[in-house]
Image (cartoon, coloured by chain):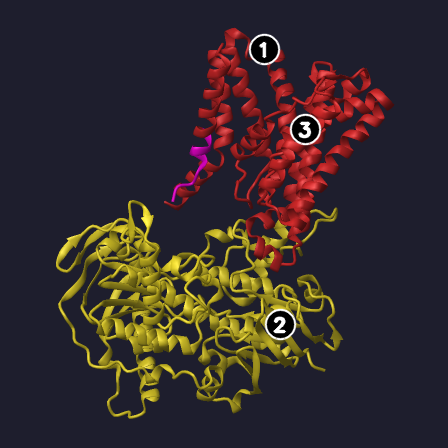
Chain colours: A red, B yellow
Amino acid sequence: MAERATFLANWRQNIIYIGFVVIFVIFALTLSDKGFLNPTNLLNIIRQTAMIAVMAVAMTFVLASGEIDLSIGAVAGLTTVTVALAIAVAGPFAGVLAGIATGLAVGCFNGWLTTRIGIPSFLTTLAMMGIAKGVAMWISATAAVPILSPGYSWAFGGGSIGPVPVLLFWMLVAGALGHFVLRRTGFGRRVLATGGGETAARYSGIDTANIKFKVLVLSSSAAAIAGMLYAGRLQSGRFQLGEGDELSVIAAAVLGGTSLFGGKGTVVGTIVGALMIGLINNGLILMGLEFSQQLIARGAIIIFAVALSQKRA
Amino acid sequence: MTAVVMKGISKAFGGVKALDNVDFAVLPGEVHALLGGNGAGKSTILKVLNGVHRPDAGSIAVGGVALTTHTPEASRAAGIAMNFQEMSLIPTLSVAQNIFLTREARTARGFLDDAACERKAAEIFAMLEVKVDPKAVVGTLGSGQKQLTEIAKAISQSSKVLILDEPSTALAVSDVERLFTFLRKLKAQGVAVIYVSHRMDEIARIADRATILRDGKHVITAPLRDLPIDTMIEHIVGKRSKGLADVQRGAVTRGDVLLEARGLSGVHKPHNVSFALHRGEVLGLAGLLGSGRSSLARVIAGIEPATEGELRIRGEAVSIRTPSDAIAAGVALVPEARATQGVITAHSVAANMVMSVLGRISAKGVVNRAKAQEIADDMISRLQIKTASRDHAVSTLSGGNQQKVVIGKCLATDPDILVLDEPTAGIDIGSKSEIVRLVRDLAAQGKGIVMISSELSELLTACDRILLMADGRAHQMIDRATLDDPAEPDPGHRLQAAERQLQIEIQKALSQETPHG
């Protein structure tokens, strides 16, 4: 009886891995004639998923600490523009610095507003979403800014080593680092404790405001890195890049078992969640569905997967 | 050298003085009881000592060194450890992770070492001789296990000053015994223990000295031998209220059967319980933690499903599946956890009072405010709730008055049957006897009442009959009157004797317990 209960609980907890395999097998069987299993196609899924995955790793920390960051898509877009402008003026090295500075600046501002002024992160980052997009449109005069640095483009998203895209390495590094920090460091434990019970964490001597500040900086920095990858891959800065990514990112984290209420999260699950979203997008396109149908199918699959993972009382 | 010296500590919250120039000193190697009613300032002074609150005035010295920074980290560095009443546990982390939160064992490279934490946690539990799984997620544990985790967390810090805030609530008698044995060992090592409890019997057994606070002021500090229980209670309650022994039970007029359970079973507990509750009587449920008292209450109130048996109300079989079914059938529950299940503390007294009757006082979906205010005012005066106004948030009230709001909320539904689950938990003794008196009054007005309490003196004072439960089963129905020794003239002594008698019956029921999975 007890063993069966544990198995059931694990089954729900691990639904993301089971779901990933099930969907992969379904697509492999039904879409093999359309080249789903073709290595090029599979690597394409990686290329399309990498930015979401990088941001979703940081989002795991944000959600686990009981906060949320809605500004990441807009920050990624803003970063593509600042990077492109800096490269045009002062070269690729300056571009990288500009990208990192953008992420840190937005993150510190988000963190400051949330932890010192006391505005809930939902509102802070919702407002920041508009501000970041507005700034990006303004400084780029709503036009695409080309990036004419092959080195930058290679390292940040465009290049590959043999058949393997550089983006895969970014994704793996972000995932491995995130997993390790969340599971094995004091910071990770404090993040989980803050989201699991803020008062209790404070009574235990954790500076929860500090943790939330750091987590929001981490999230914006990851968004900036994703923006740098978008810029490198598409060799330009455009304010539209990354638009709406926040929803895919949050969906990836939640699919992976991270709780929207804080206290629970796994980076491995998040990465698989991001890959699953990429997989679904890819499969639906190969099926020849129209964009409208893709949206509906994708939403339905996500609801189904998350519903299955819910523990029922 | 004294372990802790607090001098002239004052602390106010939004104009309300929680502590007013309080002195408090603890010696190494003593168990020092800190006593006082709710709102006396016990938790505030402990939180000041522990660094959660910064004092407005006064000085603190720990082991002769002045404590100038007021943060939990600084206090801990000074050698102070405290358990909070389940407040410092993170439900999503494991027992071991909670015990060593911010003090985790590290590997050689500086990363977290959960396996080592689990080993160390297991050692602590072994030392306490209790069984708690270090790997279990805290949120899945019962309250007794959580309490033990809190205690383990506090003692794992091997501190010079150990503060235990109500450590024995939710603990089995045997675990309390082991805790006391352990505390005596700590004493011998020169650790200063500050012990907070509402249970005088415990204080009398473990404490060397006691300090009593009342209304944020220091009343007395004295060795325990100079403080018999009567004197302690006198100091705690002041002159305002009388003890439990003075509550009159009066003549019982049992009416017709209101509620009848026939072979009632729940998912895990209770098992096959039958009893009848009459109009005008208070039926007590006695038993230890896990005996199925609360489960029975929840089944009656529609919070947990009944799996077998039937409930009859006023002679008719009823099917109660949800709390609103129960309310419609005239059953109201005053739940165990006041702050989470009883009231919405951020909402006003009035808003809480009418929460269960919104449908009745609304027309076309709009709440009739005049009616809502009328109900609130009526309850405030009827139950003598001390609140600045009906519009003040429940969180501004003392524990006893918050509990009265819960009772008022239940009475607003005009129930025939009232189920009270630990209605006096965490309430000072003055408010306790007030609540017990209220229960008697309600019964006298013709309601049928089922009451659960872990404090036997309270059950004995409030109830006409007591159903003894153990391991989910009903063991014995005891008529309250049979526990009294008519030869004993002093009501206080008579209550004590009855309590001993009931205690013996509970132990008997435990020994008859049938072992099963």
Give residue B62's position: percent from left, percent from top: 71, 74
Label 2 is found on which chain of the structure?
A: B
Magenta range:
A305-313
Residue found at the very far front of the displayed protein = B370
Give the label, 1 or 2, closer to the camera: 2
Residue under circle 2? Answer: B11
Give residue A197's position: percent from left, percent from top: 55, 52
Crowd class of label 1 (few under 14; some 14 to 19; many from 20; radius 10 Å): few
Residue under circle 1? Answer: A38
Q: Amino acid at mark 2?
A: Lys
Please say if the residues under marks 3 and 1 sit with CB atoms less than 8 Å apart. Answer: no
Of the residues under marks 3 and 1, which one precedes in the sequence? 1
Q: Nearer the viewer, residue B459 or A8?
A: B459
Residue at x-position 18% and y-position 61%: B260
Residue B100 appears left or right of B262: right
Q: Amino acid at mark 1?
A: Asn
Q: Nearer the viewer, residue A196 or B406?
A: B406
Does the stretch in magenta take in B194? no
Please say if the residues under marks 2 and 3 sit with CB atoms less than 8 Å apart. Answer: no
Label 1 is found on which chain of the structure?
A: A
Name the image quarter holding residue B295: bottom left
